[in-house]
Image (cartoon, rainbow, N blue to C red):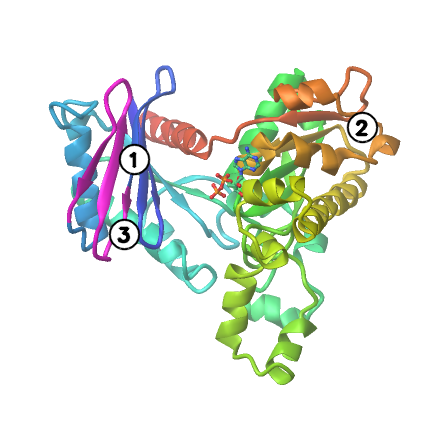
Amino acid sequence: MNILVINAGSSSIKYKLFRMEDEFALAEGTVDRIGVNGSNLTHKPFGKAEIKIESSVPNYEIALDMVMKVLTHPEHGVISSINDISAVGHRVVHGGEKISSSVLITNEVEKIIRDCFDLAPLHNPPNMMGIYACKKLLPDVPQVAVFDTAFHRTIPEEAYLYAIPYRLYEEYSIRRYGFHGTSHRYVANISAEVLGQPIESLRIVTCHLGNGCSITAVKDGKSIDTSMGFTPLEGLIMGTRSGDIDPTIVFYLIERVGLAVQEINSMLNRESGLLGLSGISRDMRDILESASKGNKRAITTIKCFTYRIKKYIGAYAFSMGGLDAVVFTAGIGENSAQIRAMVCEGLEFLGLRIDYQRNSNRDKVISSDNSKVKVLVIPTNEELLIARDTAEITKVNSDQ
Ligand code: ADP
């Protein structure tokens, strides 16, 4: 059984084809700059040379048609025909309040995704275009949607409500939704496996630290709180997003600095975070390098970044009534021993002790043997989880 995983973004489509018998990635790639001049497809078939095809790609259907052609190409392909694709799993960002797990895409599910366009205007519309294009090219193949928000549907109301007039929740669905759910779910489950303990008995804080950063309290296998909120802007300091700020700053910028709402929106999403604080880069590697040369702003940025994470770990340990494990994942979480060490420093009172050798070796478990709270580094693999969910759902469906 081969499953194609599709992540359709605002001007690109990422794809990965899995052979599910051994969960092997046969090929992956990206079509970039869809609808923009200079589009190209980068295709990496396993065991063969990577290729790049430049071509005009005006829309998602043409992009996916290119993907199908390259997957079945006699030289660069990995399957002989598109009939070898058993199902397609789509990453969808927002499922609103109705979706709490991955689902087979039906007309009703499509409507739910469309109803969430307002809540995720940059993500759900392209996700939906990817679905439409796949349905057209593979009309007899089941399609599954795996939602970023679904894992967080178990968050209780005391954690998802904002203390603004309740009618805004009722009328406009303004509440915490949380994102990166697929990643948090994946690494929490792998951590339980690594620790050899049932996830139902663990209190885990998962730290997804990539360009976007979020942190989740996973109690007994369920998300009970997460740092991203109504949108992915809330919470931790990210590559270019501010994370938590006092909302009054927005009014101040309008009234005293004379900025327009759109300018502030763009500033908070694209010019803040690591980039805004450091003035150097959105990329943690550049900031770490500058800090190592003594750059004060870089040093301060790293302190702010790690302090915010520490603050959330503390809050979530209290929310869960204790802490069994802290998990680091995504670009920064998986690769930076220094950031992991700084986050964990001073948490010994919780019974958390890092083993510095294991941390720099990037072992799976980087806490010392006598650490009450285990610390893990687990590479995230959202595509694999999407493929697994898709396989499970389409199998259940074909069994019925
Ligand atoms: P995305 O959220 O776009 O999937 P990634 O998970 O790839 O992003 O994470 C990107 C971030 O990871 C960037 O800030 C990058 O600097 C950081 N990163 C990657 N490798 C390292 C490293 N060796 N040390 C520190 N940061 C790293």
Marks 1 and 2, Cα distance to the nearest angstrom?
40 Å
Q: CA distance from mark 3 to mark 1?
A: 13 Å
Which of the pair 244/272 is nearer the observer?
Answer: 272
Q: Residues within 10 Å of mark 3 (few under 14, many from 20)?
A: many
Residue 322 x %, y %: 81, 34
Residue positioned 71% across, 66% down in the render: 163
Q: Nearer the viewer, residue 67 or 84?
A: 67
| Other-residue count near label 1 (Cα within 10 Å), few / some / many at <14 / 14–19 / ≥20 | many
| Residue found farthest to the right | 349
The numbered disc on residue 29 is 1
- Which label belongs to residue 352? 2
Dividing the picture into quadrants, the one containing residue 69 is: top left
Q: Nearer the viewer, residue 211 or 188?
A: 211
Q: Is residue 229 in sight in this rendering?
A: no
| Magenta residue span | 31-55
Give the residue at mark 3: 33
Measuring 66% from the left and 39% from the top, which residue is drawn there?
292
